[in-house]
Amino acid sequence: MPIYTYKCEQCGAKYEIFHKVREDERAIVCPNCNSTAYRKVMSTTGFLSQGSSSEMSSSCDFGGCCGGSCSLN
């Protein structure tokens, strides 16, 4: 299940909730003040890699942007 980050419109607390993509969001309640007024916050994604950079595969191995085919190279 994805993790969604919310910010309470009443008290400003940020909190994360695990729920299905199509789950009803009307049941979301701030754990700090019990308000149902919230907004979704854009959260960053990350990953943990193990090993040295010389052992890591390039993004080309995983179908990523490589070989100058996008503006990231």
Image (tube, rainbow, N blue to C red):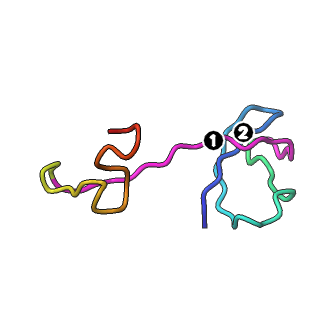
Please report the bounds of the magenta region as a residue range: 33-51
In the image, 62: left or right of 4? left
Mark 1 vs mark 2: in front: 1
Tag of residue 42: 1
- As shown in the figure, which amino acid type bears the numbered disc 2? Lys
Q: Is residue 60 magenta?
A: no
**Image quarter of the C terminus:** top left
Q: Earlier in the sequence, mark 1 or mark 2?
A: 2
Q: Which residue is rendered at x = 52% and y = 43% of the image? A: 44
| Element carrying mark 2 | strand
Tag of residue 11: none
Q: Which residue is rendered at x = 72% and y = 39% of the image? A: 7
* CA neighbours of label 1 inside 10 A, class few (<14), some (14 to 19), many (20+): few
* CA neighbours of label 2 inside 10 A, class few (<14), some (14 to 19), many (20+): some
Disc 1 + disc 2, Cβ < 8 Å: no
Q: How far from the left and from the top, in percent, is residue 2?
A: 60, 61
Q: Is residue 47 magenta?
A: yes
Q: Depth check: give the residue in front, 45 or 3.
A: 45
Q: To which residue does mark 2 refer?
A: 7
